[in-house]
């Protein structure tokens, strides 16, 4: 059971894709839950402003530390868990980090908009910064959803026991081998013969070979780590 507190200016963005399919059924079953806190509810002026111009000048607006803190403190401390700020500056989200996060009971995710958030609130409350990749989104919400999706599928009871997480990409340091299903011939393409042979050892070896071949070609960084 994982609960995620989301500090956001756009609570209506959730659950979005997380309300569908695997994660949606898991949400209905109570295997995970989320709690949106609208940062704007903590604005203290009549215009409900949450941001201001950056000290030092420059483009855009910065979300205010005091308002984000008020939103954070509205969550009872025992329900906060690890505090995460989604940011392209953060440590990269990997499958290992996903596994770690999926074992937590609570997470609190701060989703920034505009140019970002005042650094002081991140420092004062020890936010971990996490990035979902080397590109810039317009806000942290889609990044939070991606991270949550990756965590939710690993929760107990979400995927059913037929699933073998140790065979999927990254779990053994390799990318996954290719999959095939019926029909055995499609256009002029046949399924690799070994897969219809019923020879389990040969199938296993073929899959490992393919995994290695694909990883070597596509992700030399992963390949170098795997070899070590
Ligand atoms: N917010 C904007 N871009 C992001 C990224 N790449 N990862 C996480 N949060 C973000």
Image (cartoon, helix red, strand yellow):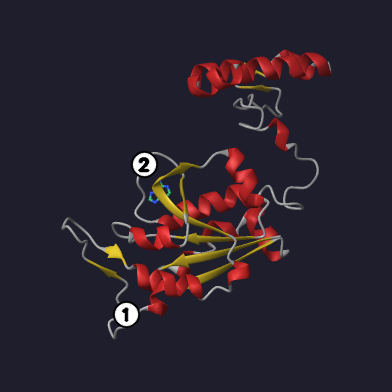
Front residue (pair 136, 126): 126
Label whose residue precedes the other's in the sequence (2 or 1):
1
Marks 2 and 1 sit apart, C-alpha to C-alpha, by 30 Å
Q: Is residue 126 left or right of residue 155?
A: left
Identify which residue is drawn at 66% across, 49% down.
Answer: 153
Q: Is residue 192 left or right of residue 214?
A: right
Residue placed furthest toward the front: 124
Q: How many numbered marks are there?
A: 2
Q: Which mark is residue 48?
A: 1
Name the secondary structure under disc 2.
loop
Identify which residue is drawn at 76% across, 19% down.
Answer: 204
Front residue (pair 170, 91): 91
Query: Which quarter of the picture shows residue 179?
Result: top right
- Where residue 56 appears, as percent x and y from the top left, is 17, 57
Q: Is residue 188 visible?
A: no
Identify which residue is drawn at 60% across, 61% down.
Answer: 81
Label 2 beta carbon less than 8 Å to ligand 1: yes
Which residue is identified by label 2? 135
- Where residue 228 appears, as percent x and y from the top left, is 60, 17
Q: Is residue 193 left or right of residue 38?
A: right
Q: Is residue 74 above or below residue 89?
A: below
Front residue (pair 186, 110): 110
């Amino acid at each position: 059971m994982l609960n995620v507190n989301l500090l956001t200016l756009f609570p209506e963005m959730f659950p979005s894709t997380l309300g569908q399919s695997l994660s949606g059924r898991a949400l209905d079953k109570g295997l995970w839950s989320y709690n949106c806190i609208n940062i704007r509810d903590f604005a203290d002026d009549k215009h409900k402003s949450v941001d201001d111009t950056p000290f030092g000048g420059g483009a855009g607006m910065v979300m205010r530390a005091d308002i984000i803190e008020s939103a954070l403190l509205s969550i009872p401390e025992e329900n906060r868990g690890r505090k995460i700020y989604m940011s392209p500056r953060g440590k990269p989200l990997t499958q290992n980090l996903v596994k770690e996060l999926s074992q937590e009971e609570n997470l609190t995710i701060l989703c920034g908009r505009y140019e970002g958030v005042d650094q002081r609130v991140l420092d004062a409350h020890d936010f971990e910064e996490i990035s979902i990749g080397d590109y810039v989104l317009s806000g942290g919400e889609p990044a939070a959803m991606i991270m949550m999706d990756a965590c939710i599928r690993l929760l107990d009871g979400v995927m059913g026991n037929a699933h073998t997480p140790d065979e999927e990409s990254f779990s053994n340091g390799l990318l996954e081998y290719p999959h095939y299903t019926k029909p055995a011939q499609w256009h002029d393409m046949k399924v690799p013969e070994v897969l219809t042979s019923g020879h389990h050892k040969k199938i296993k070896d073929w899959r490992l070979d393919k995994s290695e071949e694909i990883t070597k070609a596509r992700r030399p960084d992963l390949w170098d780590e795997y070899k070590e």
